[in-house]
Image (cartoon, coloured by chain):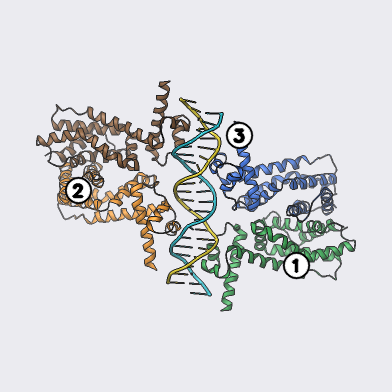
Chain colours: A brown, B orange, C blue, D green, E yellow, F cyan
DNA sequence: TATGAATGAGCATTCATTCAT
DNA sequence: AATGAATGAATGCTCATTCAT
């Protein structure tokens, strides 16, 4: 049954993602993944070559979801400032709404796997934002700094504060999100 | 000889820090630490109760160095803006100059050990910065936002960009550091 | 298959019991147990939590066998003397027929585990014998000595001589066993 | 200094004997022996080839002490019964007065070392007792049983009960010792 | 297709022994 | 002669992966 297969595959991925988010990659045995997914250990190896491949696929999945949600929030018609506020508010809410995914991604990029992947991902991620900031610079509403710096000024606070939120150090409600994004706009705007 | 002992202990800590920075805690066997330190495996256990104690001590060491360097960069006599630029430029340069230490700290806070330590450390770290930002708010030169948010706006870009620097995505020279800190000041300033 | 599982578990227990009897607990690595049992090291841990649990279970097994065999040999209807001869002859033959088991039990009670277990076991073991000797004292056919002393006078020679037998210093045939038990009866009888 | 050397050697032996009696052979690291003896680890190896040799020498020492004390308690002039009572009372008191030594000997004979030694020791030990029981048989006051059996009937209860005494299951005072030896005499006497 | 029992390489840790001082 | 820091072989145990059912 096609449906059955997909179900199991998805269950394995969900179980693995949650457990790795909670316990880290090395703290999560395949046996535990199988147990939470409600399947046998051997079954994991019918859907994924090995544990590394499983991690890889989960990463691609999470990463893809993030990218597409983000891309949709960008509207080339809007003025730069409005777009900025939209993009980074949406991104912040997206991260907050997906704590497991974010935790997993962090674990992933901190592990040996992520090292290589990271560069490729960033480049891919950056494409739409690169265009966006380029437009801002051209219109002289954004500081004339290298793209990577602008990314750090805008995404850095978001990532830092989402982590704080998930660790319970701060509680990011909509007002606070608006404040943050508005403030970081001050950093990038001319 | 006193010298010899200190040498071995330091060699173990240095080797462990570098390897854990590169490969993570679980990815770094004691045998490898011993090999890079140029000593026998058993010797590790003459200086540290176990592997956990070793990373605990390394963490305290690195953490202490960071704290003291940071504290020294703060001069209550200076105006808020000048202090801000000094503090965060120094911090950025400190991080860049100690790539292994930074990587290690990240690995540490991502491991089960760090979970508990993190909150305590952050509170300790924050004390001087808390006072600093409080002063800025009082003088109405800094936005009236929660301390944690101000921290995210200032420290977030630094951490993000240092990581980028270490991954080779960007090359943070003194000019760029000045630009970043100056821009992030725009985010926190009123 | 149920059969297979039981086989492996039994093979591990038998191998462990033999080797521990011969070499002691600390002299018997898990790798050696696995090898003699004809299984992989990891398999031990499918059936037993750890090495400690393994010997605990072996102990309970051996102990249980001894207790039940002993209990069956006691017939309250018989006169005290006949019962004594039956009980201790049976016990002696039981010990001789199970040399590994006896050696294992000795090793067990000499290890840190046994210290605690021993008192509990002895009390349990003693219950039927306590009743038996009490009856003998009441009937004035057994010396009026503390129960523990009577146990030493009756069981002491048996244990001593079984050990001698197993070490090849003496060969306990049925005649000799009868002689021993008959003689030790002289020690306890009035 | 001759005196110094002997002192250290004796201190090592005493420390090792006590610790092995308490913790067993495998539970007693050389470092602990050195610590209790108040000397450096390396020093052990100046007096003894290795740990095995140390054990061996302690055994010979303890064994020799027991043998000589025992031999002195035998008076060929006395009647067999009186001699029996003297010998085994003395032996019992000797064991009780030297709990460490007894525990050590037990540990020794249970370890791989003891296996071989035991036969030789028993033969040596037995010599005087062999003569004693032979005389008793000849005079027709002792049962005509093999020497080893007579040894089991007489020594078995003593060893069993001394162990019980040391484990706190029974308290062997002089009266009880007299009772035990008197009762075991009933077992061997004709 | 799905399973989970079996496996053994790999890890942290201990400890008898050596040897430079 | 005495020391104890240094060593690495050996051990108990875990867990990714395989394969017979």
Residue matched to label 3: C4
Residue A99 sits in quarter:
top left
* A84 in relation to B85, above or below: above
Spot occupied by residue A137 in the image (x, y as percentages of width and height): 12, 37
Asked if badges 2 and 3 are on one and the same chain, I answer no
View extreme (bottom): residue: D1
Residue matched to label 1: D70
Q: CA distance from mark 1 to mark 3?
A: 56 Å
Q: CA distance from mark 1 to mark 2?
A: 88 Å
Judged from the image, the secondary structure of the residue bearing numbered disc 2 is loop
* Circle number at residue B172: 2
Q: Does the rendering let one see residue B108?
A: no
Asked if badges 1 and 2 are on one and the same chain, I answer no
Instruction: Specify few, some or many for label 2: CA neighbours under 10 Å numbering under 14, 14-19, or 20 or more.
Output: many
Q: Quadrant of the C terminus of chain D?
A: bottom right
Instruction: Specify few, some or many for label 1: CA neighbours under 10 Å numbering under 14, 14-19, or 20 or more.
Output: some
């Amino acid at each position: 049954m096609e449906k059955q297969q997909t179900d199991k595959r998805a269950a394995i991925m969900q179980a693995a993602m949650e457990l790795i988010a909670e316990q880290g990659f090395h703290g999560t045995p395949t046996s535990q993944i199988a147990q939470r997914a409600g399947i046998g250990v051997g079954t994991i190896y019918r859907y994924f070559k090995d544990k590394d491949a499983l991690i890889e696929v989960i990463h691609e999945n999470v990463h893809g979801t993030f990218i597409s949600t983000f891309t949709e929030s960008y509207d080339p018609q809007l003025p730069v400032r409005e777009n900025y506020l939209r993009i980074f508010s949406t991104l912040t809410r997206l991260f907050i709404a997906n704590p497991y995914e974010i935790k997993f991604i962090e674990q992933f990029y901190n592990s040996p796997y992520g090292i290589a992947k990271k560069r490729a991902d960033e480049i891919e991620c950056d494409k739409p934002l690169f265009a966006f900031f380029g437009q801002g610079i051209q219109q002289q509403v954004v500081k004339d700094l290298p793209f990577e710096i602008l990314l750090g000024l805008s995404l850095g606070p978001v990532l830092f504060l989402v982590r704080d939120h998930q660790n319970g150090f701060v509680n990011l409600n909509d007002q606070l999100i608006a404040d943050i994004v508005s403030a970081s706009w001050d950093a990038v705007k001319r």
